[in-house]
Image (cartoon, coloured by chain):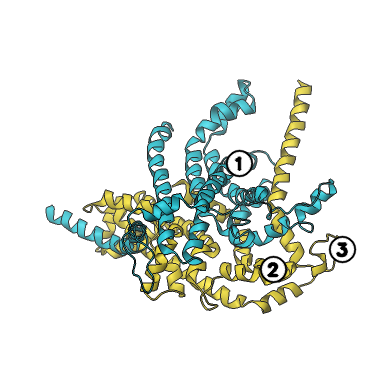
């Protein structure tokens, strides 16, 4: 009995060690990025405990590429997509949750199709569309294909369906119009879903690369990811420590937000995944 | 009554209309247009595009690069999906169990999810660099010769697979964690009292409870294996000699580097067919397997 207890605890300790080893392995790219970015270039590949610290790499990175402009672009892109998604998905979700309209189930299947055929797959044709609309190299052009999101519609519909119909009836008796009911009953009660969806959407579009790469071609529209790809391309010949500093600059806002609101982030992704 | 239901119909469509317009413009129309374009030749300033039937598809079947990227994509899927799902389950079990400082471990596992692929590819590029890169520095300590990981066709795809697993596993962990948190602790207690080992408990009980989650994650993982190509832009550009190129990356190259939209559309049709098959499979499979929960 005692022996089996001890061997169990040895096994448990080994298991914990494995779990932590994996965690360190998982963090190692980030740890390395911090190391290289905060030390002079000659320490980028030499690891000495007392290597001098510096912020020089960040200054050089900031001067070499228009990061400030990229930040503004990404910020505008992410907010415009989020606002449009909230409006479009709320309206559509309300329709699917509470209205019996003609052709509803067929329409819903069509909406769900977008979960499979994401905008990434249609870059070729969407590029021609943007060219026809004269929206190539505009932030609107980057955002448009993502604004009606099947994922958002589905998520909000599920939430709206759980809201008791009596609340809506009560609001109607008090003389609220359709839009007022939506804004005063449904939207406030679905707040956790909006937070969850918002976080998922912001992290997705902050990090999105392929479509923005295709559709933008100037500093004025490029988001951070595309700017970073050009800045860090091996053929650009920029030093490691400067590339890692630039990389950290680009991920900093999201990383800081994640570290501060870790629980909220994890729960949002969970919430969004379960529905 | 009928008037009311007509009103419902009108309101319903009015509410759905804005989203519907966007979906039509940027999902359904381009899907159909892609299909149509795959039957036309690439037009030039002098010669407008003309109907060529299946010529683009015949060209595709003769295109060695197409077969290479299709094969690569298959290996990429087989290489990433099972490992990232297995790791995700392990991570979730650890983080849900008695691991010391488990919220810190959870953070470590999840962090890759919120970092842009393009940024982490920059860092991984350094790991893989021959001689001075981290992997070579470590393997030298054990007496292995230096290796050009990304320059060797036999290792390059493996390197890409490793990054994708690293990026995905923590994301999938979240869904398993959510599922595990809904399992009542009494279940495990009961199994323990009955003398079941942890492995037995996992195989006979947990594994089945997690089945719907696994299917959900599996579908996401399959889609990702056709969608996640960002790292190629930094690490390999599909090289050497297309050894690491994937279908979506090849589509990008054909459309925007070789400027052959007709052939890019043809390749996109293949991708759309694959995704449609996944969708159909999902319907059939989900109906059969998930309902016993």
Labels 3 and 2: the sequence-earlier one: 3
Percent across and percent down for residue A219 are 55, 77
> Real-space Cα distance between discs 3 and 2?
22 Å
Quadrant, the N terminus of chain A: top right
In the figure, what tint was chain A given?
A: yellow
> Helix or strand or loop: what does disc 3 sit on?
loop
Q: Distance between the residues labelled 1 and 3?
A: 38 Å
B102 up-or-down from A254: above or below: above
Disc 3 crowd, CA 10 A, few/some/many (<14, 14-19, 20+): few
Q: Position of residue B199 (x, y in %)?
A: 63, 28
The picture's colour for chain B is cyan
Q: In this view, does A271 lie above or below B197?
A: below
Say left or right for A261 vs A193: right
Residue to which mark 2 is pinned: A243
Q: Is mark 1 on a helix, strand or loop?
A: helix
Mark whose residue sits in front, 1 or 3: 1
Q: Is residue B213 visible?
A: yes
Residue A63 in percent (x, y) is at 68, 79
The residue identified by callout 3 is A50
- Decide: marks 1, 3 in contact (CB < 8 A)? no
Q: Is mark 2 on a helix, strand or loop?
A: helix
Residue topped by disc 1:
B83
């Amino acid at each position: 009995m005692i022996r089996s207890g001890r061997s169990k605890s040895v096994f448990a300790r080994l298991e914990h060690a494995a779990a932590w080893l994996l965690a360190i392995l998982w963090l190692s790219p980030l740890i390395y990025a911090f190391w290289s970015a905060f030390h002079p270039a000659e320490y980028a590949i030499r690891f000495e405990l007392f290597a001098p610290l510096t912020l020089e790499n960040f200054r050089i990175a900031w001067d070499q590429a228009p990061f400030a402009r990229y930040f503004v672009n990404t910020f505008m892109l992410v907010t415009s997509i989020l606002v449009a998604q909230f409006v479009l998905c709320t309206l559509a979700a309300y329709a699917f949750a509470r209205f019996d309209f003609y052709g509803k189930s067929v329409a819903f299947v069509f909406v769900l199709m977008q979960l499979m055929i994401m905008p990434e797959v249609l870059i070729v044709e969407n590029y021609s569309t943007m060219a026809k609309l004269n929206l190539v190299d505009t932030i609107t052009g980057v955002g448009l294909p993502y604004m009606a999101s099947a994922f958002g519609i589905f998520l909000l519909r599920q939430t709206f369906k759980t809201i008791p119909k009596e609340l809506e009836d009560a609001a109607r008796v008090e003389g609220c119009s359709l839009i007022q009911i939506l804004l005063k009953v449904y939207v406030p009660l679905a707040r956790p879903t909006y937070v969850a969806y918002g976080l998922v959407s912001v992290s997705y579009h902050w990090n999105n690369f392929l479509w923005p790469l295709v559709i933008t071609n100037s500093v004025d529209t490029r988001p951070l990811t595309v700017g970073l790809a050009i800045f860090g391309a091996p053929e650009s010949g920029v030093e490691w420590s400067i590339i890692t500093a630039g990389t950290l600059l680009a991920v900093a806002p999201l990383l800081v937000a994640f570290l501060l609101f870790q629980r909220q982030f994890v729960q949002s992704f969970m919430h969004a995944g379960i529905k | 009554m009928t008037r009311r239901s007509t009103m419902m119909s009108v309101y319903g469509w009015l509410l759905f209309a804005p989203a519907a317009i966007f979906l039509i413009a940027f999902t359904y129309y381009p899907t159909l247009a892609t299909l149509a374009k795959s039957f036309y030749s690439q037009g030039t300033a002098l010669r407008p595009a003309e109907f060529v039937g299946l010529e683009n598809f015949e060209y595709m079947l003769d295109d060695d690069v197409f077969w290479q990227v299709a094969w690569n994509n298959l290996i990429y899927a087989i290489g990433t999906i099972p490992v990232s799902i297995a790791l995700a389950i392990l991570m979730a079990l650890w983080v849900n169990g008695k691991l010391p400082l488990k919220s810190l471990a959870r953070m470590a596992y999840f962090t890759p999810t919120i970092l842009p692929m393009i940024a982490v590819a920059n860092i991984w590029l350094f790991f893989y660099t021959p001689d001075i890169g981290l992997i070579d520095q470590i393997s030298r300590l054990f007496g292995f010769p230096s290796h050009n990981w990304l320059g060797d066709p036999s290792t390059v795809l493996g390197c890409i697979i490793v990054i994708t697993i690293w990026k995905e596993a923590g994301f999938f962990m979240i869904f398993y964690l959510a599922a595990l948190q809904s399992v009542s602790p009494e279940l495990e207690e009961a199994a323990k009292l009955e003398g079941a080992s942890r492995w037995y408990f996992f195989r006979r009980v947990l594994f089945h409870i997690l089945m719907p989650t696994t299917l959900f994650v599996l579908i996401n993982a399959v889609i990702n294996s056709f969608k996640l190509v960002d790292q190629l832009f930094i690490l390999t550009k599909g090289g050497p000699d297309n050894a690491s190129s994937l279908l979506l990356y090849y589509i990008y190259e054909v459309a925007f580097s070789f400027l052959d939209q007709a052939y890019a559309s043809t390749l996109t049709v293949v991708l759309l067919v694959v995704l449609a098959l996944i969708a159909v499979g999902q319907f059939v499979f989900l109906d059969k397997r998930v309902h016993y929960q």
